[in-house]
Amino acid sequence: MSKPAGEIGHLRDEELPAVRVIVPPDLSSRVFEDDLDPGDVVFDGNRTAMLIWHERYPLGRGWRSGWVLSYDTDGKGNLDDYIVGLSLAGVDAAVAQARDYLRSVGYRARGWPLS
């Protein structure tokens, strides 16, 4: 089964909770018809938390680039974002930091059950 465009993988191992890692294409380079648009990113059936790379993310009165964790806070579609930061190359550290954050807020290790 192929991965959706722009998604570099599902990181699933003994270090739960699971996190989907999503990197939109570089819009300053060649653009393809099936490239992922950040506005098209949606949760999967289990509402697995998503770690998404943003070139421009609003923060306070300005903008910054970095990893942003989007997660369902209670399994009922109430969403929240957590700015992880770090560089695009720091994906392993970003995943570790995202998992630590999810554990600290009591996120379920296996995500939310299907509705």
Image (cartoon, rainbow, N blue to C red):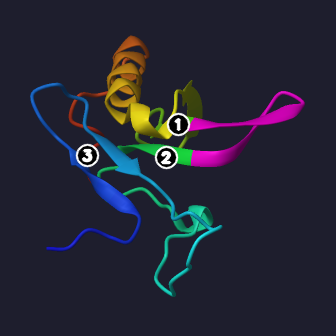
* 72 within the magenta span: no
Residue 73 appearing in the image? yes
The spot of residue 90 in percent (x, y) is 41, 31
Residue appearing at x 56%, y 79% in the figure:
31
- In this rendering, the answer to whether 1 lies above or below 45 is below
C-beta proximity under 8 Å, tags 3 and 1: no
Q: Nearer the viewer, mark 3 or mark 1?
A: 1
Type of the residue with mark 2: Ile
- Is 74 positioned to the left or the right of 56 in the image? left
Q: Residue at x 60, y 47 (%)?
A: 54
- Rendered image quadrant of residue 44: bottom left
Which residue corresponds to mark 2?
52
**SS class of the residue under badge 2?**
strand
Report crowding for label 3: few under 14, some 14 to 19, many 20 or more residues within 10 A (C-alpha): few
Q: Which residues are magenta?
A: 54-66
Mark 1 burial class by Cα count in 10 Å: few <14, some 14-19, many 20+: many
Which of discs 2 and 3 lies nearer the camera? The answer is 2
The tag earlier along the polypeptide, 2 or 3, is 2
Disc 3/disc 1 C-alpha distance (Å)? 26 Å
Q: Earlier in the sequence, mark 3 or mark 1?
A: 1
Say whether marks 1 and 2 touch (CB < 8 Å).
Answer: yes
- The residue positioned 21% from the left and 35% from the top of the image is 110
Which residue was labeled with disc 3? 113
Q: Which mark is residue 67?
A: 1
Q: Residues within 10 Å of mark 2 (few under 14, many from 20)?
A: many
